[in-house]
Amino acid sequence: MGCDEHTEKSNSLWYVGVILSIVGSICTNMGVNLQKFSFMREAKGRSVVDKRGYFRQPLWVIGLLLVVGGSILDFVALGFLPQSLATPVGGSTMIANVVFASLFLKEKFTRSDGIGTALVLLGIIIVAMFAEKQSVCYTLHELVALYCEPLFVVYATLMCVSCVVLFLLTRKMEQTLKDKGRTSPEYKRFRKLHPVSYPALSGIFGAQSVLFAKSMAELLKTTIEGDNQFVTVGAYAITLSMFICVFMQIHWLAHGLQKFDAVFVVPVFQCFFISVSIFGGGVYFKEFAQMKPLALAMFTLGAIITISGVVKLAHRDMHKLSPLRRMRAAVSMLLFIYRCQKAREIKAHWTMSPTQSETAAFFQEHSVPLICSKKLTVPLESSTSPPSARLLGQRSKASVLPVGPEGAAIPAASVSANTAMASASVTPEPVSLSASPITDREGTGSSVSSLTGRREAPAPVLPPSVPLKN
């Protein structure tokens, strides 16, 4: 009889459960964003070797305490509300998520985020108006009997298979990313699924923790009325299952936040958490059986609107660049293409065996300083008498090399045979004093010898009209 009196009293205080659920959701979301902020600080301020595990990060621990505190408030709210009502109201955490993500993580609040937030608010209002607000008191024997219902056995089997499949897929995607890389075709098949797998696992385990927590709340309500339910193994098995599910929820959510954006991970987590919790509460506690058809239809509509808002918040590109960054990326790509084209021109120019003057002009045009690797053994003095006849066959070579950024010549040995730079050899030729000025190419009679062993071209023959001085 005491249980019935407590049930009637708790049903009249359902709004207290709504307030506790909202406050608990805000605390939980603030803790999650603090954990993400801790991961960002750890990745930016420490090397790979010095990085600490998330249990050794103070901000992450503070976030964990907030998550635990929010979960406790949610647990207390379950004593005043049916599970199918408490979970959608907890979707108010999405509003806090966009605020805390902008405050702590500097993540941009977009128009899509605003639409999603409005949908979540509308769905929560509809759910709160038409949901069943009567909470029934259960004993341990009744709870165990509900666990053995055939419909719940099917539900539990479906949840176990989903968790195992998601776990195996997550392992495979992590191994593929590690071995093949993010741009590999093998990983591209999982590119959309990988960010969803972590919050999906966390949401499924979180929904089961709510189910066990609701069972715990019912046992505590009965115990408070004088009928102690914690005298058998079943009550402690439910308690242990609740803590295991809470730990798995925190574990997978932490891994998801460590690898992907909080503005994506948290909405996906909430989507799975809300939908699976509503479904599980309706199956286990048979809460939908007490609702009228119109109320059930409106409740379903409100739940769909809430989940749609969560999906809208989750439907965003995690690596989307801002317009300024896209412009910078385009400019960098154009500069890269231009420099590659210039490098191809330089390579093509050297393969054509240019002369010394052409080489100097080419590098001067491209603002590359030049040095000579070997001094001329015979200086050219066009203003004095021409060299003697015995020097006509003597050749002195001067290798023209571009100077590197530090001012040192680039060694010719480091250049491959296909792209090696040709060294220009200078051959003095007799010049008539009375002759008109000749160009550098005619005056030096330069010929080009390649590093690949090509034979030198013969010096140009002067026209017969130019007399030679003996």
Image (cartoon, rainbow, N blue to C red):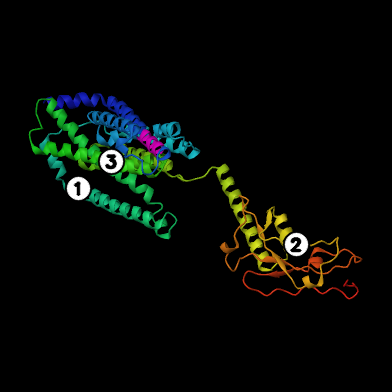
Instruction: Pick the residue in front: 119 or 254.
Output: 254
Please tell me whether mark 3 sits on a helix, a strand or a loop.
helix
Which residue carries the number 2 mark?
357
Q: Is residue 22 left or right of residue 459?
A: left
Q: How far apart, in angstroms, are the residues tagged by discs 2 and 3?
A: 74 Å
Residue 304 visible in the picture = no
Q: Picture coordinates of residue 81 (x, y %)?
A: 25, 30
- Residue 249 is marked as 3
Instruction: Decide whether residue 35 is among the magenta residues.
Output: yes
Nearest to N terminus: mark 3 or mark 1: 1
Q: Is residue 236 left or right of residue 313?
A: left
Mark 2 neighbour class, 10 Å CA radius: few under 14, some 14 to 19, many 20 or more: some
| 11 relative to 119, above or below | above
Quadrant housing residue 80: top left
Instruction: Pick the residue in front: 156 or 73.
Output: 73
Residue 326 visible in the picture = yes
Instruction: Decide whether residue 102 is among the magenta residues.
Output: no
Give the residue type that dot 3 points to.
Gln
Q: Does the CB distance between marks 3 and 1 fall below 8 Å?
A: no
Disc count in the image?
3
Please tell me whether mark 1 sits on a helix, a strand or a loop.
helix
Mark 1 neighbour class, 10 Å CA radius: few under 14, some 14 to 19, many 20 or more: few
Q: Picture coordinates of residue 86 (x, y %)?
A: 28, 33
Which residue carries the number 1 mark?
151
Please report the bounds of the magenta region as a residue range. 32-42
Q: How far apart, in angstroms, are the residues tagged by discs 2 and 1?
A: 91 Å
Nearest to N terminus: mark 2 or mark 1: 1
Nearest to N terminus: mark 2 or mark 3: 3
Q: How far apart, in angstroms, are the residues tagged by discs 3 and 1?
A: 24 Å
Q: Picture coordinates of residue 200 (x, y %)?
A: 32, 46
